[in-house]
Image (cartoon, rainbow, N blue to C red):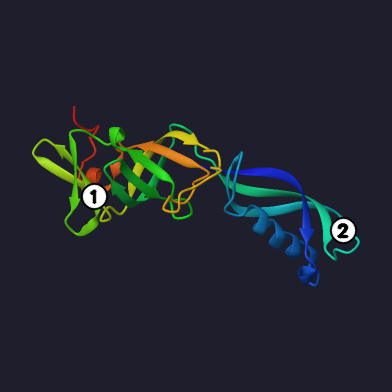
């Protein structure tokens, strides 16, 4: 889910930060450039460390110092088939939206929710729908009472940046993870906690 990637970039340190220790100033500039940004390798969640710094050139009339920096970042890059634990964010007739805390664009579309199911108005939140999975005579609700939800990654997409957006459009998501909870062991962890493990001691 997380991996280290090494990058090289030209970093501009503004005059206001030149009084800081060099590595601190460069790390601050790197965080502004990369933190919480989606790159071709995934979502940058942390600047791990700086390997080398070269340069320090000041352009005439600018006052900022420019450095060539080699550094490592921690990126969130899930792979298809990986099982990840998340929390409930919201739901509607299209499916579920889950959150990892640092990343909130995880979607479980309706066809990837266990069947038979139904989508109904949430009696505790009139602005939201909730999903109910029917298994035998039991019904299992998926809502914000679910402390942890396990999903399996089905697809990772990087939508192109729209040139025009409506005023009421949802915030643009540069990376979208599509998951499924339609399999044994997936979905709210509470569904499976009551399942007793099969003992190998019985012959």
- Residue at x 78% of width, y 62% of height: 13
Between the C-alphas of marks 2 and 1, the distance is 56 Å
Q: Nearer the viewer, residue 61 or 19?
A: 61
- Residue at x 15% of width, y 38% of height: 134
Report x, y in % for residue 47: 65, 54
Q: Quadrant of residue 194?
A: top left
Mark 1 sits on what residue? 129
Secondary structure under tag 2 reads: strand
Most distant residue in the right direction:
60
- Residue at x 33% of width, y 47% of height: 149
Report x, y in % for residue 129: 23, 49
Q: Which mark is residue 170?
A: none
Secondary structure under tag 1 reads: strand
Left or right: 170 in relation to 19 = left
Q: Is residue 76 visible?
A: yes
Q: Nearer the viewer, mark 2 or mark 1?
A: 1
Report x, y in % for residue 185: 29, 38
Identify the image quadrant of the C terminus. Answer: top left
Most distant residue in the left direction:
137
For disc 2, the neighbor class at 10 Å (few under 14, some 14 to 19, many from 20) is some
Mark 2 sits on what residue? 56
């Amino acid at each position: 889910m997380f991996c280290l990637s090494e990058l090289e970039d030209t970093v501009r340190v503004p005059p206001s930060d030149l009084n800081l220790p060099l590595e601190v100033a460069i790390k601050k500039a790197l965080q502004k450039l990369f933190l919480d940004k989606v790159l071709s390798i995934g979502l940058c969640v942390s600047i791990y460390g700086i390997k080398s710094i070269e340069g320090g050139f000041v352009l005439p009339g600018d006052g900022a110092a420019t450095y060539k920096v080699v550094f490592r970042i921690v990126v969130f890059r899930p792979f298809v088939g990986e099982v990840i634990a998340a929390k409930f964010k919201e739901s509607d007739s299209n499916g579920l939206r889950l959150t990892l805390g640092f990343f909130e664009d995880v979607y479980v579309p309706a066809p990837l929710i266990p069947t038979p199911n139904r989508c109904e108005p949430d009696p505790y939140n009139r602005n939201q729908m909730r999903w109910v999975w029917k298994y035998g005579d039991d019904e299992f609700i998926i809502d914000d009472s679910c402390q942890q939800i396990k999903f399996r990654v089905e697809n990772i997409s990087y939508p192109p940046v729209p040139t025009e957006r409506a005023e009421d459009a949802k915030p643009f998501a540069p990376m979208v993870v599509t998951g499924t909870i339609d399999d044994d062991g997936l979905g709210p962890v509470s569904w499976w906690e009551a399942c007793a493990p099969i003992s190998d001691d019985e012959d």
